[in-house]
Image (tube, grey):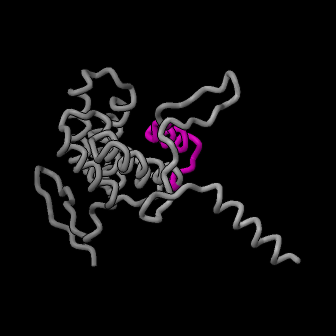
Amino acid sequence: MRGLIILSAITGLAACVGTSDDGRLDPLAQDLEIAAPAGTVVLQEGVDQILVGDRLMDAGQHELALRSYYRAAADRGLDADVLTSIGAANLALGRIGQAETLFRQALDENDRFVPAWNNLGVTLMEQGEYGEARRVFEHAFALDSGLSDAIRDNLRLAIARMENNVYSEPNNQNGLGLIRRGGGVYELRVDP
């Protein structure tokens, strides 16, 4: 009994579908629109995936933000903004080498894009490259005309870390050093 019901349903559905002369199904009419309830907003474009990714980054959802940035790359291509966003997500995920590569690619696309310069400087700071980070922050600061407090703060931090790095004791781990003996005489000290 059940088989008879299924067979009659399939036969009935097949009768409803039109076919062309070559036996294929006819496509639906192009002007066929499914009516939405009155007052429904019809979106013509999708949501900007960069904006979605930025909000996810603010919420601490870095992996989801990275996926959103990849969708943005599929929609609009790999421009400096998309590359910088992908790099920022990778940096937040601790993928410093990948982030640096992406920021440098973004700067190859647009060498006047300030966020890429700033984020490259942050990446270099994470790697302990304070001198290069300082140069990068100075360049970002100049392009931004000193308007961004974040870039100014990053530049100050890079300068401070560079000065601390030069004069700090951990850099003198090889046991060599100078000992002042007086009268302008210094002796080379070697600690085993």
Q: Position of residue 24 (x, y in %)?
A: 47, 63
Picture quadrant where residue 190 is located: bottom left
176, 25: nearer the viewer: 25
Q: Is residue 192 above or below residue 159?
A: below
104, 181: nearer the viewer: 104
Is residue 67 at all visible to an observer of this figure? yes
146, 62: nearer the viewer: 62
- Give the extent of the magenta segment: 46-63
Name the chief secondary structure element in magenta: helix
Q: Position of residue 40 (x, y in %)?
A: 65, 26
Q: Residue furthest front?
A: 21
Quarter of the image where the C terminus is located: bottom left
Q: Position of residue 38 (x, y in %)?
A: 69, 23
* Residue in the picture at 22% in, 41% down: 136
Quarter of the image where the N terminus is located: bottom right
Q: Residue furthest right?
A: 1
Q: Position of residue 42 (x, y in %)?
A: 57, 29
Check residue 140 for magenta coloring.
Answer: no
Q: Residue furthest left?
A: 184
Is 144 left or right of 40, judged from the image as shown? left
Is 95 left or right of 128, judged from the image as shown? right
* Residue in the picture at 16% in, 66% down: 188
83, 3: nearer the viewer: 3
Is residue 159 at all visible to an observer of this figure? no
* Residue in the picture at 29% in, 68% down: 173
